[in-house]
Amino acid sequence: MSKSPSVPPEVTLRALRSGPLAGVCRVPGDKSVSHRALLFGALCDGAVEIRGLGEGGDNRSTARALEALGVGIRLAGTEAEVRGVGFGGLRAASAALDCGNSGTTIRMMTGLLAGRPFETTLEGDASLTKRPMRRLAEPLRKMGATIEGRADPARPGDVFPPLRVRGGALTGLRYDLPVASAQLKSALVLAGLQATGRTELREPAQSRDHTERMLRHLGAPISADPATNTIVVDPAGWNGQLRAAPLTVPGDLSSATFLIVAALAVPGSDVVVENVGLNPTRTGALDALAAMGADLTIEPTGDAMGEPVGRVRVRARGLRGTRIAGTLALRAIDEVPALAVAAALAEGTTVFADLEELRIKESDRIAALARELGRAGVKVEQRPDGLVIEGLAGREPRGGTVEPEHDHRIAMAGAVLGLASSEDTLVPASEIATSFPSFAETLRALGATLDPV
């Protein structure tokens, strides 16, 4: 694998009230789709060319883990060649797989390795080792895999990384997922493709469906019924091989949402984000901002692997509070840090609910957002499943120092909020490269006052 892209030299970013943002920009390749392109490409029968790949640290964690399992990967910026070896071509790693900060990497790799006839240890950074994995381990154990991990007296019965996976012969199962989770669903789909018999998964609501779209594109025996939130994997009669085909990754809507909110935060702004993924299971953030009164123009421009792609134009306008809950909250779960900044600058109250999963992301995002918005002078009520935010309605947020707690989205949220303040906001920048290495550079090109210290 080629060397990592150069990390911006700044250790800290200084954000300050900006003049209007203007211009046309792009964002990195979708992080979720990039994980899957690398992983499913490795399972193909032959070489797979990938374009538009995300260059963030999480995607590189997946690439490194696959290399350690015997997959040849050549990375060149946003392009990659993956020399697929199929399920049967994976080999035991000589050391533990380092998943870094990536929950997607460790969960999907665990599902994949549950069906391979060797033992693997998966580990990660300090943040990842705090993320509970019982929801993943239990169904994989029912299918026949051995999953062991670290115990925590504070959460008896749960399991935490490092995980030790001993794979082998799996049996399909019928399973109701306790939460709508694309990572959990995808891990079980990967196990089901290696199992004997049919696997049927049902979610309480539809999570993002990148896995289903891409695997169908590559010829996997998978079907989905959105009406019942059911996914079926039936490998009977399948030769066990995915079709090698070029893959194109759309721009990351989660990254784009921070740019969109930045434009909304600075009066007079007019920004266009091109080539962004518009998968309907992911566009909850756009719907939430529209409900807040945002001036958005969304124009579909094409399709990539069954993923709709388009451009989003945003013009600054005052926002109003709204309620983000239920299915809308699920479809916007990764964008909540950006939406919380929009709520902080709006007029009126915004309620975020049904977001318990935010407690076990890279940080406890509910607690982190409550702390960071409170530091900036925003009145916030923290609830078990969300937040109630009273907008500043034209008043400036306070400056200060953001404490991201190893969470890239908390760091970016703090920087965007700082663009509306007349006081310095200092943001540790190292975590941002996890998903959006060019975040500061892109905002500066649009006119933002976001400079290295």
Image (cartoon, rainbow, N blue to C red):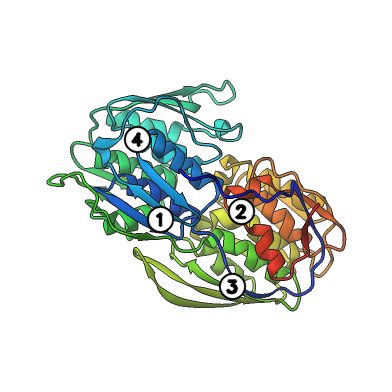
SS under mark 3: helix
Residue to which mark 1 is pinned: 206
- Mark nearer the N terminus (1 vs 2): 1
Residue to which mark 4 is pinned: 70
Residue to which mark 3 is pinned: 290
Given the image, on which type of amino acid does mark 1 rest?
Gln
CA distance for labels 1 and 4: 34 Å
| Residue 428 horizontal side relative to residue 130, left or right | right
SS under mark 1: loop
Disc 3, disc 4: CB below 8 Å? Answer: no
Q: Position of residue 70 (x, y in %)?
A: 34, 35
Total number of numbered labels?
4
CA distance for labels 2 and 3: 28 Å
Q: What mark, if any, has residue 8 been given in the picture?
A: none
Given the image, on which type of amino acid does mark 2 rest?
Pro
Residue to which mark 2 is pinned: 437
Given the image, on which type of amino acid does mark 4 rest?
Gly
